[in-house]
Amino acid sequence: MDNYRSKRIGAVVGVFLLSIALGMHDGNQEHLSDLVTYALNNTALFSKILEQKLDQD
């Protein structure tokens, strides 16, 4: 695995974990499934934005 790919995977995992932390702090996600769905939606959005940015470069 090259350095670029490992950084990208690290960024996506970081966004997922940050989304879980923010969802827990916000208190809007009462159940674990809601929290995971919230985090996955944020991660998918971040991944899409990252792909578009990398395609431009």
Image: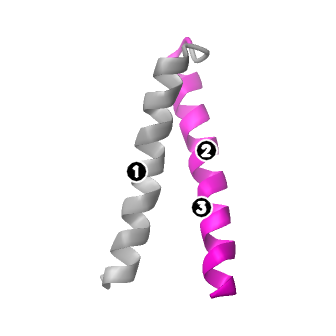
- Is there any visible trace of residue 21 in the rendered image? yes
Find numbered disc 3 in the image and state the secondary structure of the residue it sits on: helix
Q: What residue is disc 2 on?
A: 42
Task: Please state which amino acid type lies under the numbered disc 3.
Answer: Ser
Horizontal and vertical percent position of residue 25: 47, 19
User: Is label 2 in contact with label 3 (beta carbons under 8 Å)?
Assistant: no
Task: Please state which amino acid type lies under the numbered disc 2.
Answer: Asn
Q: What are the residue bounds of the magenta stretch? A: 30-57
Ranked by sequence position, the earlier of labels 2 and 1 is: 1
As measured in the structure, the alpha-carbon distance from the residue carrying label 2 to the one carrying label 1 is 11 Å
Query: Which quadrant of the rendered structure holds the C terminus?
Result: bottom right
Q: Residue at x 36, y 61 (%)?
A: 10
As measured in the structure, the alpha-carbon distance from the residue carrying label 2 to the one carrying label 3 is 9 Å
* Residue 14 marker: 1
Query: Which quadrant of the rendered structure holds the N terminus?
Result: bottom left
In the figure, residue 8 lies in which quadrant?
A: bottom left
Q: What residue is disc 3 on?
A: 47
Apparent side of residue 37 relative to residue 21 in the rendered image (left or right): right
Magenta stretch contains residue 51: yes
